Image (tube, grey):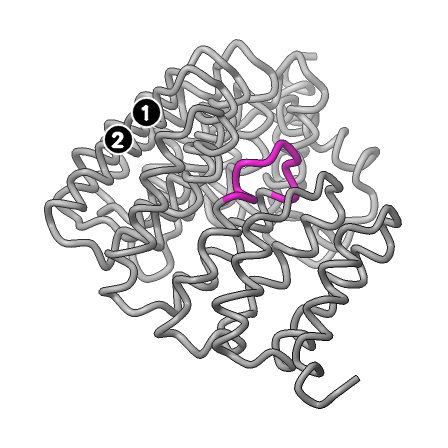
């Protein structure tokens, strides 16, 4: 082989191996993309290798997953951040495939690339990509779009920001539950980039739509949004907008939603508390949270009671011994503790080394015995 032909050799090998029937050969070729890119140089990588990958129609998920991962760290091989936009087309295609893990990795790589792109390039290349995916005919594209808004929004001019908020609102009301689930999952990240003025209007409106969704798989993801949004809002706005949602969710008809409330109850308390600790003060806890605890501690689903038991030990010091004893009956705490001791015995250290919690249980037990003796 002559010296003049040497630069052509790596791309020829890549093309041959990517078309090979042996999946392992195709996979090995994808995992050597960085080596091939260095051999080709930055310009030929941009003009030959990336277009070739964009047109690659491999149907093996493992190969596509490896490609999505490799492209996420490919900026140095295409000439730096000023050329980062050339990596978007193949990743955009991967965002539309059927396999979830491939789409997730493609979104992750797009976020990594987008976070390094110049603002002008985000406006010229990244935001149009997000809009195309959000308007995609297949739900897979719209699902992927939900995970990109928090990267696109910050650098957008005001007119585009308005449009992006409107598009996300439409995704929250999409006909496909999978899209609404993705919108619920990513709402917290998107909300963190939105201005305070629009947070209490546009974002809370989207959140309200998700909390009233007819699919419990969407509502349970909205529970996680309670904590994320609560940390962005002022304490008084949390009390007005987040706490009522938590109370309603604790009485949801779906045990999976109630389970999520119980599982995240401590984090929800942190979300609605005052700065700097964001821990819910005892007065608000007794008024808003403890009724939820009482409801969940006697829930018909063992999964819900078990989830509550795993977090209530951490909540007790926040609520205070006297308030807890006055509000929760011994029977309701025992119901949760029974599941805790039998189902989560590995976490005994949480109880044994927390004097506040031990004191609560001893006081409650003493109070219960005195009451029974008096009745006798």
Disc 2 to disc 1, C-alpha distance = 6 Å
The residue lying at 41 percent from left, 27 percent from top is 246
x, y (%) of residue 59?
A: 72, 39
The residue lying at 62 percent from left, 31 percent from top is 98
Q: What element carries label 1?
A: helix
Q: Residue 241 carries which label?
A: 2
Quadrant of the image containing the N terminus: bottom right
x, y (%) of residue 86?
A: 43, 62
- Give, as a single range, the part of the protein colored magenta: 93-102
Q: What element carries label 2?
A: helix
Tell me which corner region of the image, top left, top right, bottom left or bottom right, holds residue 230.
top left
Foreground of the two, 305 or 355? 305
Q: Does 60 sit above or below residue 3? A: above
Q: Which mark is residue 104?
A: none
x, y (%) of residue 62?
A: 76, 47
Q: Does 176 sit above or below residue 38? A: above
The residue lying at 68 percent from left, 50 percent from top is 65
Disc 2 and disc 1 in contact, CB within 8 angstroms: yes
The residue lying at 28 percent from left, 29 percent from top is 169
Asked if residue 80 lies left or right of residue 198, the reply is right
Quadrant of the image containing the C terminus: top right
Give the residue number, with chain letter if any, for mark 1. Answer: 244
Foreground of the two, 241 or 279? 241
Q: Does 80 sit above or below residue 329? A: below
| Crowdedness near tag 1: few (<14), some (14–19) or many (≥20) residues, C-alpha within 10 Å | few
Tell me which corner region of the image, top left, top right, bottom left or bottom right, holds residue 372.
top right
Asked if residue 246 lies left or right of residue 259, the reply is left
């Amino acid at each position: 082989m002559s010296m003049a032909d040497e630069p052509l050799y790596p791309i020829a090998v890549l093309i041959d191996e990517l078309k090979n029937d042996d999946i392992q050969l195709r996979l090995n070729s994808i995992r050597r993309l960085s080596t091939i890119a260095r051999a080709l140089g930055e310009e030929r990588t941009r003009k030959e290798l990336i277009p070739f990958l964009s047109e690659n129609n491999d149907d093996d998920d493992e190969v596509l997953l490896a490609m999505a991962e490799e492209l996420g760290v490919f900026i140095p091989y295409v000439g730096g951040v000023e050329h980062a936009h050339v990596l978007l087309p193949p990743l955009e295609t991967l965002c539309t495939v059927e396999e979830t893990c491939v789409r997730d990795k493609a979104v992750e790589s797009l976020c990594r690339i987008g976070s390094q792109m110049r603002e002008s390039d985000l406006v010229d290349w990244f935001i149009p990509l997000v809009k195309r995916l959000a308007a995609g005919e297949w739900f897979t594209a719209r699902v992927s779009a939900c995970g990109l808004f928090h990267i696109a929004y910050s650098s957008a001019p005001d007119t585009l920001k308005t449009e992006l908020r409107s598009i996300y609102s439409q995704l929250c009301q999409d006909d496909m539950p999978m899209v609404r689930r993705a919108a619920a999952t990513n709402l917290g990240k998107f909300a963190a980039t939105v201005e305070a003025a629009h947070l209490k209007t546009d974002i809370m409106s989207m959140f309200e739509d998700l909390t009233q969704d007819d699919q419990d798989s969407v509502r349970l993801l909205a529970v996680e949004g309670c904590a994320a949004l609560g940390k962005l809002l002022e304490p008084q706005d949390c009390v007005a907008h987040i706490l009522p949602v938590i109370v309603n969710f604790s009485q949801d008809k779906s045990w999976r939603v109630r389970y999520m409330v119980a599982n995240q109850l401590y984090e929800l308390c942190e979300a609605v508390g005052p700065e700097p600790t964001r821990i819910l003060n005892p007065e608000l806890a007794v008024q808003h949270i403890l009724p939820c605890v009482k409801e969940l501690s006697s829930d018909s689903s063992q999964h819900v009671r078990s989830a509550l038991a795993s977090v209530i030990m951490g909540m007790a010091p926040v609520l205070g011994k006297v308030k807890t004893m006055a509000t929760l009956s011994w029977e309701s705490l025992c119901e949760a503790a029974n599941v805790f001791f039998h189902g989560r015995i590995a976490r005994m250290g949480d109880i044994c080394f927390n004097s506040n919690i031990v004191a609560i249980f001893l006081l409650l037990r003493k109070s219960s015995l005195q009451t029974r003796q008096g009745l006798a």
